[in-house]
Amino acid sequence: GIQVEQSPPDLILQEGANSTLRCNFSDSVNNLQWFHQNPWGQLINLFYIPSGTKQNGRLSATTVATERYSLLYISSSQTTDSGVYFCALRGAQKLVFGQGTRLTINP
Amino acid sequence: GAVVSQHPSWVICKSGTSVKIECRSLDFQATTMFWYRQFPKQSLMLMATSNEGSKATYEQGVEKDKFLINHASLTLSTLTVTSAHPEDSSFYICSAATSHEQFFGPGTRLTVL
């Protein structure tokens, strides 16, 4: 089945810093999503990005499907960006999640 | 964006009782809904896929008689944890799918005493 690996597993930054989160996957993709799980457990959709680049405010994402990776960029981090970031790919009608990157932004 | 609600947000029950969790897609119709379980500091684990009007498909190792799923309409799916025991304590999250994306409910934290 599809394998999804995220790195780094943990990231601690000061407010205002920039960060790059990586998602590697084992199979070709036609459906990749990035999520942010906030400290209360809610998963928030960030991007649907099977290929190319998208931007939404301070966040942007790039997927290079031919090389089987996706990157999530967070600029000018804020404490509210803390939480766990997951990438997930759809295979056989179900999402396969990576293990997540736990991001902590300190004031 | 699409909104998925989940109720209750938390529940505490005694061992041996049954607990029902509701999942609703509020502004779209979802032919497919999913139920996940998440342990502390771990990723989401898919329990079952629920299609409207048909039986749910359970992942390997998930007891279908323990976790009853009903997808009665295009906007409602329910998960019933039957005869709950302390090991069933967890964070349960539902999700509803459009043609491209999945959207997630806020989760239900179940504690079985």
Image (cartoon, coloured by chain):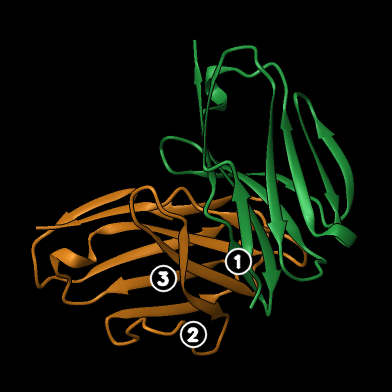
Q: Are marks 3 and 2 on the same chain?
A: yes
- Report the residue marked by disc 3: B78
Give the residue pinned by disc 2: B56
Q: Read off the residue under disc 1.
A: A96
Q: Nearer the viewer, mark 2 or mark 1?
A: 1
**With respect to residue B12, does A90 lie above or below?**
below
Q: Which mark is residue A33?
A: none
Report helix, strand or loop for mark 1.
strand
Closest to the observer, A78 or B67: A78
Q: Secondary structure at mark 2?
A: loop
CA distance for labels 2 and 1: 18 Å
Above or below, B55 relative to B41: below
Picture quarter containing residue A4?
bottom right
Give the colour of chain B: orange
Q: Are marks 3 and 1 in contact (CB under 8 Å)?
A: no
Name which residue type carries label 1. Val
Instruction: Tell me which residue sits at (75%, 24%) in the image.
Output: A58
Q: Amino acid at mark 3?
A: Thr
Please provide percent x and percent y for residue B52: 58, 80
**Callout 3: helix, strand or loop?**
strand
Crowding at dot 3, Cα within 10 Å, few <14 / some 14-19 / many 20+, comes out as: many
Q: Position of residue B86 (x, y in %)?
A: 14, 64
Category of crowding for the residue at label 1, using alpha-carbon neighbours closer than 10 angstroms: few (below 14), some (14–19), many (at least 20):
many
Left or right, B10 with respect to A22, comes to left
